[in-house]
Amino acid sequence: MSFLDLCVEDSLPIWQRCLETDFLRRLADGTLEEACFQGYLVDDSLYLREYARVFAWGMLHAVDMEEMRSFYSILAFVNEAEDSTRRYYLHLYGLDDGAIQALPLRPENQAYVDTMLSAAREGPGAAECMMACMPCMLSYFWLFGQMEERFPGVARTPYGRFVADYTGERYTNLCRSWSAFTDRVCADLDAARRERCLAIFRACSQHEYHFWRMSERPRTDLALARVSQEEVRR
């Protein structure tokens, strides 16, 4: 078993709790209130901005070109492929991506990104960056794979496009590639660093749970982030 496999096994009970949150259960059967999903989109947008900083930090401190290319490929996915679906839903709900950036992170979101950024800054290397980020990447792959298996009708809900982003061939292949990179940078960790990295992975998995619970509550500050209906129709 690789070190990353060990981390996933350790956090799997937390991911199971995520799957059982009201937000994901209602998303699966299509009964999730749109106001909750809109709040999630805003919080996710703010989270991804900080998430990208972790990879930028990794690139800045990369020890070789392979590390730099790996961090760049993840950053490119966040900024391009994942961003495409996020923007689709923002436009659908009349939310302006630029205006969203002025909104505050909710406390659960702020605690999550603080943990990720601290792990990256304190390092001392790529292993800590990946331990901070892989719980998000891999838990989404696991959660939505489970969701499609248990609730195949999710594809016909308003949230089907969102779920499909994390169950398709491209995301599957990228997760394999990022996992292989993580295994490489974690291959020769000493015992103390392995324990720290495992703790980072577990902590960020726990923050994923709190993020889903947070998203069960709609945001109440979206009025200033909305565009006119005329702009939405364009």
Image (tube, helix red, strand yellow):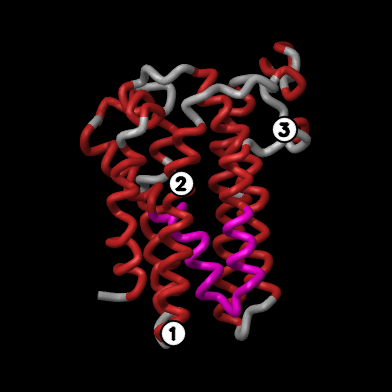
Q: Which is closer to the viewer, label 1 or label 3?
A: 1
User: Label for residue 189?
Assistant: 1
The secondary element bearing badge 3 is classed as helix
Task: Reply above or below: 75 against 19.
Answer: below
Mark 3 vs mark 2, CA separation in Å: 21 Å
The quarter of the picture where residue 103 lies is: top right
Residue 15 as seen in the image, left or right of residue 56? left
Magenta segment main secondary structure:
helix
Magenta-drawn segment: 114-138
Residue at numbered disc 2:
208
Spot occupied by residue 213 in the image (x, y as percentages of width and height)? 45, 34
Relative to residue 46, is residue 139 drawn left or right?
left
* Residue ID at (61%, 24%): 219
Quadrant of the snapshot with the N terminus: bottom left
Q: Quadrant of the C terminus?
A: top right
- Residue, disc 3: 100
Q: Are marks 1 and 2 in contact (CB under 8 Å)?
A: no
Give the residue type at disc 1: Leu
Q: Is residue 144 magenta?
A: no
